[in-house]
Image (spheres, helix red, strand yellow):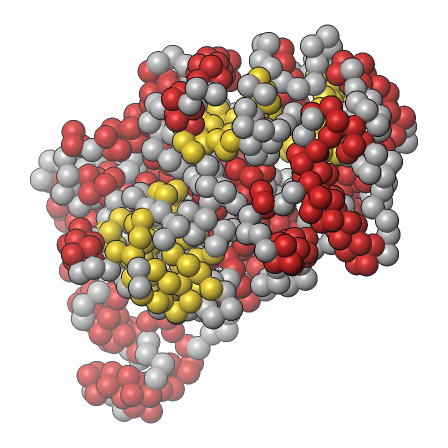
């Protein structure tokens, strides 16, 4: 990994988005940027160099918000760290020392000073936030000596020793690697604490006195020595260097890598590190710490939303160890009413300055407010559409930002299921409601109960739906959270790890359901006198926080009820209205056309509701499986003479004509790219002896004959045999029947006053002559039908570009083809030499190893397959300047691939109806210059 990172230089890094602006404050090679009252080197535009956190700390300092001073070590240093085999670049240590001096000057404190020590936090900060994935260290600078000074200065020795033990615990874990060794082992530091508490007969951490905390520290230091053979470092500068190395190191930890894969964040971005003077939310009852959103990140409501904990440190809120109070309660608390007023003003300034909902952390130290970080708040898709709608209307957000800031994939959440109302009511009335926790990730989930991430993954792999229940989650649970339908925790608030991650992933989540007791050892969940075991059915409602025993049927989302089932009117659904606002905005920017892959009139209707402007691919073969047409199809395949084949085809003709007629009518004048038969014929014949015998009987053939023919048709993957245009060339009568059906349907529909725009597409073309052969046939049949019906039909004939030879000889092929549609499913398998049907057995491992950045069948391999597409586009246009270009492989609904297609200058993307909202938004983002 280190080498991959190392090889990508600064030049690569700076070519990414936003880098242009960054030369502004940054001298080349500068490793550290200061933020403080007198000197503030960076600003909010410098995210790729300072990371999101560093850039925003600088920006908040610049606009006069109370930010504790500190400095940011750039992402470039992280890149260099990996380039030099995990060593700091030359000169870094000296630079860090001089910035520590500057910080000492501003704070009037000193590193290691026995009576007035400077204490700092060391936090990661990548360009895009990766919540909880990398390491953080607080209270750095404490040692056996400075702890005494802190005790004296605050007059609160208990606080000082508690801070020291927290620091040792964090540092021991993160820098020195003293951690639990398997999933269900307790944290070793927690274990030491539990033993001590047991010896002392106390229950809460807060019951530990100064003296017992000193004892705890002794035991912690011993644990570290025992586990690592090393002493805990007492020199603050040594502590700092250790912490820096470990934060840089955490960029490449498993969970950070997994997170980047999921969110497609490049490894080569690196993380910045922020060293910031400490403020304390745990010095007493006039102190607090909190996390707040300027609007509700789950629903998008314009309310100040968040949580705080009195007398606590920041990680207590995020870790969900104690359940915090809603921030609104601060207003009624005499101790914090003033701070609350100040926070309300901060809320307003942040939205105005950053132009989006902010998720910020604050600390109150002795009633004084400090801002520790701010970032664009992660939100559910529902909150996204509502916030974008509201903030654009309030002129707080630019329409461009409303489009650019979306995660198009997340829009699918709006289509996610909700509980079937009747079944839901039955569960409630039947006494199956176990408890209600916090509604942390909207939607309905039902599945088998599991308690560990590994079990969740294992069952999900086997095709089971699971709900993952944990006391609280930690980043190690990420894999399980990805695999689960829903996540349930018994502890923690709406900004706990479980809630944050679920919201971002669009997972259904109920957090902090205090009424349930989870026993990992026994594998049980107890609640309200009931016991559920691993594997039992459980249902959770992430919109209300309800937890139910047993399964509950799920039903269509509101959006689907408006758009598809039409059981709800648009004016009755606010969700629909927000969604429609965003889609309209997207259409304003979008340059790519939007088509759909649809094979039935119903699918076409759905697609049009989602914004499709035509069909990009009709796979005609899907029509042959309906009803008893498969019999005629099989008869045709088993025919031993052209005559018998034609007779069977004649039976299929009326079916196909009806199919096309329905499609043309549903399209109401929009274009339809219809592909002639593509798959190899063995896909249509039965393979089991019994089914073959039945077929033989039906067709009046001997079972042996059928078996022989089926065996002759057998093909091995990757399905590159007798398929595509090769079929139409071998059996022209099949193409003739299909073309006749298309034109007869077109003539009929056109005659009824509805426009038709058929585009006949020939699959799997690698040679111009293959295309010529089929195009000649198309023109001949089209001419015949037009003559017979007296209808003049305007149509196009083109081809799929889906094998490399087709792409490489696109100039020749474009002499005949009036359009190209990239069949990137086949183009990927043929370019990569990787069977699309067999790759699932090794691709996940490939992704983990970083051999491929993402599954190339889901997200275009732009360097390889993309190059073939570029060649085809260039060569195709050279021959036929105005050639129509589109894509109809699965990639047409993938945001990254859509951006690539936009940059290639394609005319449209085509994808399945339910991916259209995603493609629509991604296409608008592409026009606004989105890069990945
Ligand atoms: C393709 O190959 O990308 C394509 C759309 O065709 P099919 O998936 O039907 O092979
Ligand atoms: Mg194909």
Q: Residue at x 79, y 58 (%)?
A: 227
Residue 626, percent from left and from top: 22, 65
Q: Quadrant of residue 832?
A: bottom right
Q: Is residue 436 left or right of residue 346?
A: left
Q: Residue at x 75, y 27 (%)?
A: 152
Q: Residue at x 79, y 22 (%)?
A: 116
Residue 691, percent from left and from top: 28, 84
Q: How many marks?
A: 0
Residue 651, percent from left and from top: 17, 67
Pick the front one: 273 or 779:
273
Residue 408, percent from left and from top: 43, 36
Pick the front one: 734 or 207:
207
Q: Is residue 732 left or right of residue 483?
A: left
Residue 311 showing in the rendered view:
yes
Looking at the rendering, in which quadrant would you find the C terminus? top right
Residue 805 showing in the rendered view:
no
* Above or below: residue 495 compared with residue 462: above
Q: Residue at x 43, y 19 (%)?
A: 334
Q: Quadrant of residue 92?
A: top right
């Amino acid at each position: 990994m280190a080498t991959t990172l190392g090889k990508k230089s600064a030049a690569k890094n700076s070519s990414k988005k936003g880098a242009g602006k960054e030369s502004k404050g940054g001298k080349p090679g500068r490793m550290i940027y200061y933020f403080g009252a007198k000197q503030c080197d960076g600003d909010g535009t410098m995210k790729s160099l300072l990371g999101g956190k560093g850039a925003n700390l600088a920006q908040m300092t610049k606009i006069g918000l109370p930010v504790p001073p500190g400095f940011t070590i750039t992402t470039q240093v992280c890149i260099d760290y990996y380039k030099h085999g995990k060593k700091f670049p030359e000169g870094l240590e000296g630079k860090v020392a001089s910035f520590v001096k500057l910080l000492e000057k501003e704070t009037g404190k000193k590193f290691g000073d026995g009576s007035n020590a400077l204490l700092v936090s060391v936090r990661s900060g990548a360009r895009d936030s990766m919540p909880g994935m990398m390491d953080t260290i607080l209270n750095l600078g404490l040692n056996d000596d400075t702890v005494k000074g802190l005790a004296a200065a605050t007059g609160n020795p208990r606080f000082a020793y508690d801070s020291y033990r927290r620091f040792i615990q964090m540092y021991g874990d993160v820098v020195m690697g003293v951690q639990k060794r398997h999933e269900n082992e307790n944290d070793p530091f927690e274990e030491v604490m539990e033993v001590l508490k047991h010896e002392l007969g106390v229950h809460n951490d807060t019951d530990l006195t100064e003296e017992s905390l000193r004892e705890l520290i002794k035991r912690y230091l011993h644990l570290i020595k025992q586990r690592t053979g090393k002493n805990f470092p007492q020199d603050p500068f040594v502590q700092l260097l250790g912490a820096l190395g470990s934060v840089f190191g955490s960029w490449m930890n498993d969970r950070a890598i997994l997170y980047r894969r999921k969110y497609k964040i490049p490894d080569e971005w690196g993380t910045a590190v922020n060293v910031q003077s400490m403020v304390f939310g745990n010095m007493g009852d006039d102190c607090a710490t909190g996390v707040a959103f300027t609007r509700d990140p789950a629903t998008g409501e314009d309310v100040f939303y968040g949580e705080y904990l009195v007398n606590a440190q920041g990680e207590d809120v995020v870790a969900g160890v104690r359940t915090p109070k809603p921030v609104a309660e601060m207003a009624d608390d005499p101790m914090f009413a003033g701070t609350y007023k100040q926070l309300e003003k901060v809320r307003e300034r942040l939205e105005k300055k950053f132009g989006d909902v902010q998720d910020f952390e604050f600390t109150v130290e002795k009633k004084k407010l400090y801002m520790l970080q701010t970032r664009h708040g992660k939100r559910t898709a529902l909150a996204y559409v509502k916030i974008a709608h509201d903030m654009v209307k309030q002129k707080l957000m630019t329409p461009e930002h409303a489009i650019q800031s979306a995660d198009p994939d997340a829009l699918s959440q709006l289509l996610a299921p909700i509980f079937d109302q009747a079944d839901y009511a039955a569960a409630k009335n039947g006494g199956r409601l176990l408890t209600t926790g916090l509604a942390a990730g909207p939607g309905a989930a039902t599945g088998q109960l599991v308690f560990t991430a590994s079990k969740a993954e294992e069952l999900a792999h086997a095709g089971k739906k699971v709900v993952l229940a944990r006391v609280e989650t930690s980043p190690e649970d990420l894999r399980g959270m990805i695999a689960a339908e829903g996540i349930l925790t018994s502890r923690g608030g709406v900004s706990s790890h479980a809630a944050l991650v679920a919201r971002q992933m669009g997972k259904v989540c109920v957090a902090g359901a205090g009424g349930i007791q989870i026993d990992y050892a026994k594998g049980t969940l107890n609640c309200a006198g009931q016991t559920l075991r691993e594997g039992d059915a459980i249902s959770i409602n992430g919109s209300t926080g309800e937890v139910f025993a047993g399964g509950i049927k799920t039903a269509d989302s509101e959006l689907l009820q408006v758009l598809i089932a039409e059981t709800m009117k648009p004016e009755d659904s606010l969700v629909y209205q927000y969604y429609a606002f965003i889609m309209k905005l997207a259409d304003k920017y979008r340059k790519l056309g939007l088509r759909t892959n649809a094979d039935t009139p119903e699918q076409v209707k759905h697609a049009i509701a989602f914004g499709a402007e035509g069909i990009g691919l009709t796979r005609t073969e899907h029509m042959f499986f309906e009803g008893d047409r498969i019999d005629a199809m099989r008869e045709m395949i088993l025919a031993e003479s052209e005559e018998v084949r034609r007779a069977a085809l004649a039976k299929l003709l009326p079916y196909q004509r009806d199919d096309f007629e329905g499609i043309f009518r549903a399209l109401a004048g929009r274009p339809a790219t219809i592909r002639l038969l593509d798959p190899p014929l063995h896909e249509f014949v039965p393979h089991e002896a019994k089914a073959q015998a039945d077929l033989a009987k039906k067709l009046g053939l001997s079972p042996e004959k059928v078996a022989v023919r089926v065996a002759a048709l057998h093909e091995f993957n990757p399905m590159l045999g007798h398929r595509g245009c090769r079929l139409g060339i071998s059996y022209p009568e099949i193409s003739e029947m299909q073309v006749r059906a298309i034109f007869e349907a077109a003539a009929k529909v056109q005659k009824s006053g509805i426009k038709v725009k058929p585009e006949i597409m020939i699959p799997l073309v690698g040679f111009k002559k293959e295309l010529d052969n089929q195009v000649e046939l198309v023109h001949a049949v089209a001419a015949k039908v037009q003559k017979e019906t007296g209808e003049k039909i305007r149509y196009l004939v083109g081809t799929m570009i889906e094998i490399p030879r087709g792409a490489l000889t696109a100039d020749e092929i474009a002499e005949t083809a009036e359009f190209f549609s990239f069949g990137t499913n086949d183009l990927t398998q043929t370019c990569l030499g990787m069977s699309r049907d067999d790759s699932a057995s090794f691709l996940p491992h490939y992704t983990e190893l970083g051999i491929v950045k993402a599954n190339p069948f889901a997200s275009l391999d732009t360097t390889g397959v993309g190059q073939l597409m570029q060649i085809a586009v260039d060569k195709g246009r050279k021959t036929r300047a105005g050639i129509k270009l589109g894509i109809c492989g699965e990639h047409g609904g993938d945001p990254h691939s859509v951006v690539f297609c936009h940059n290639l200058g394609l005319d449209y993307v085509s994808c399945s109806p339910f991916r259209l909202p995603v493609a629509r938004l991604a296409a608008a983002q592409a026009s606004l210059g989105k890069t990945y």
